[in-house]
Image (cartoon, rainbow, N blue to C red):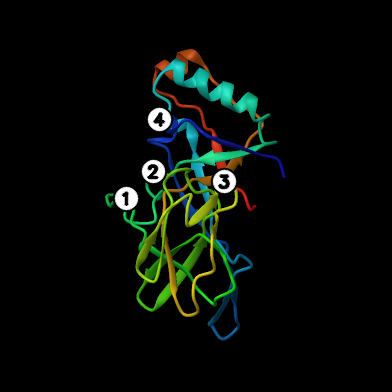
Amino acid sequence: MAFHEIRFPANLSFGSVGGPERRTEIVALTNGHEERRTPWAHSRRRYDAGLGLRSLDDVAALIAFFEARAGQMHGFRWKDWADCKSCAPSGTVSFQDQEIGTGDGVRREFALRKAYASGPARYWRPVTKPVEGTVLAGIGNVERRAGVDFSVDTASGVIRFAGPPEAGAVVTAGFEFDVPVRFDTDRIAVSVASFQAGDLPQVPVVEVRL
């Protein structure tokens, strides 16, 4: 699938509405009980880019970005302002934010991920689009140097260490990240009069699997 490693203008995504969605299939049994299951291992995000538009110049920037992506054809990066760090939104990224694996003395590559925990349940979200220059990493509570001790593939979210972490050593990372998305429409309808009156166009954006 074609994907452009470019971020949707962050000033336009600020103010947008969106978040994760799940798909759950529910079957009601004759005894009144339910059976529930989901075909999705991971949630998917949806957003409305139209709500972040504040001027006609913003509309022009949106249309230019839409045309350059050929509508739904090419994916792109999206900054989710409510969930774009390995730590809390108000926090500062640390190399100890997320546990991404345990060394075995052989493996050198580790995929970035983020944990969402509540009570006894925990969900690990794959992070495939880290922001360049923001990734920190550590082995056994010791921070490592980017570009020397490890490198990052910002197109896949994989960290590669210069040498394999020793067996039993916990590998951690901190980062900022984007969501891989595409437009969920092949049409944008804008009226200057209605826009100036406060009627914003709907521009749906949906997360893609990579």
Tag 3 secondary structure: strand
Labels 1 and 2 touching (C-beta < 8 A): yes
Q: Which amino acid is tagged 3? A: Pro
Q: Which amino acid is tagged 4? A: Asn
Closer to the chain start, of discs 3 and 2, is 2
Tag 4 secondary structure: helix
Distance in Å between CA atoms under marks 1 and 3:
19 Å
Q: Residue drawn at (44%, 75%), measured in percent from left and top? A: 169
Residue 89 shows which numbered tag? 1
Residue lying furthest top: 193
Distance in Å between CA atoms under marks 2 and 4:
10 Å
Labels 2 and 4 touching (C-beta < 8 A): no
In the rendered image, the vertical position of residue 209 relative to residue 192, given as above or below: below
Which residue bears the numbered disc 4?
11
Q: Quadrant of the N terminus?
A: top right
Which residue bears the numbered disc 2?
81
